[in-house]
Image (spheres, rainbow, N blue to C red):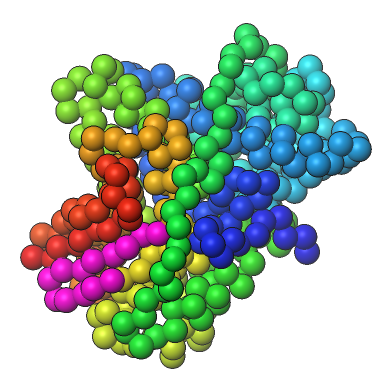
Amino acid sequence: MEILDTYLEDKSTYHFAEEPLSLQSEYFNVSILKSIEQLAGKIDLKPVLIISAQILSYSQFSKFFKEKRKMKEADRKKFVENYFAHCGFGKLSMRSISNKGGHAELNSDHFAAAWIKYFGERPKNYPGVGYFTCGFLCGAVEAMYNVPCGTFDGKQSLCIAKGDDKSRFEVYRGLRRKLNPSPSFGKQQEEDEPLTDTSGINDYKVIELIKNLHLTGLATDHGFIESFDSTWTKQYANYYPMVMLRLLMQADKKLGKGGVGHIRKIFTEAAEENAYFTLGKILNSKFWKENITGIVSSDTNGKWHACLDIMTGFGCGRWELAEGSSTEYKVNVINNPETNAFLKLVGNTKAPLGYSMGGFLMGLANYIQKNPSPEVVDADFVAQMKSSKGDISYKEEQSRMVGSEKDTLMILVH
């Protein structure tokens, strides 16, 4: 089976054609979308959710097709379809697309299936949930036909999440816009220090076991990545950072006083909930019990190491526990793709932007403290864990965004 990405050891992330990729859960993909959609009355979501994906897709495929100049049109379409399925987004057909546009269809749609699973069917008068897919298609079509990014526009006309039998996207030439390029790998952090190991476990072995799963949607008939009793996507690691920055740039003007705080809450809470879902699925899986349990220590610090190794193995940079006690945990996140992208896109900022890192780590701390053994990991489990969090907080002790050499977060368990 063709593997369409590579894990870069020096960057601790997956990549294809110089676009970093990281694994994201089905729950995160639709729960954060649901939160962002609630801003629709005040913020135009098209440049936030669709154009962000368009820029990244164009950047990736334009680099790839530049190296494959002799690839025929039909083969280019097939490659994009296979890549879409490999990343777990579903089964895509581009046969009706030409250099003038056309339509693309999905008989299976990750975002629609996950939305129905957690939130039920959407009303007919609502937009479809394929914001990312619409942008992905626009960028891919531009790259296929070697036209500038911003040449094509798109809209969703059918959505499985609304009860339609397929999801359909219209792609057409619109008013040409000049779109800024992708941050690609962003501003990289040097990794001079070896992976620390204060717990006696073999972090490298845990990370290697996760990487060697070689997760791909090409292994299934419907183009979904199925693992740990759930579905996952190999999402552009730059997608949600670009979405967050675009929201922050409009926050004060469109949302009024406290707008930035509202955006911070969206991303912090989504990351915390993702921790409960991801850890719940993985730590209670057959894979974990058979392959990992025996090589990690059962004390609290050992559990921290193992959970942070999941993030490293998922391509989210290198996460490691520097210090741990019963009330404080210091975590270094090296080459976090989100920070790398922020620094490339906007440079240093007056305040740290590690909302997602902090949210996930608060969820991790609560998970380890509660040590649940859920029979089912679903939305109810996530809500129960969140409501029982207690007094757990984080602070960014060091932040590359404000000029520090590394990202170091303190998790405080009161």
Per the image, is 333 magenta?
A: yes
From the viewer's perspective, is residue 306 above or below residue 40?
Answer: below
Q: Left or right? Give the position of 29 relative to 89.
A: left
Per the image, is 397 magenta?
A: no
Residue 112, can we see it? no
Residue stretch rendered in magenta on the structure = 322-334
Q: Residue at x 62, y 19 (%)?
A: 150
Quadrant containing the N terminus in the rendered view: bottom right
From the viewer's perspective, is residue 149 above or below residue 336?
Answer: above
Residue 309, can we see it? yes
Residue in front for this viewpoint, 233 or 185:
185
Q: Residue at x 70, y 14 (%)?
A: 173
Q: Residue furthest bottom?
A: 294
Q: Main secondary structure of the magenta part?
A: strand
Quadrant containing the C terminus in the rendered view: bottom left
Q: Residue 186, how many percent across, how many down? A: 50, 43
Q: Left or right? Give the position of 209 relative to 297.
A: right
Residue in front for this viewpoint, 378 or 228:
228
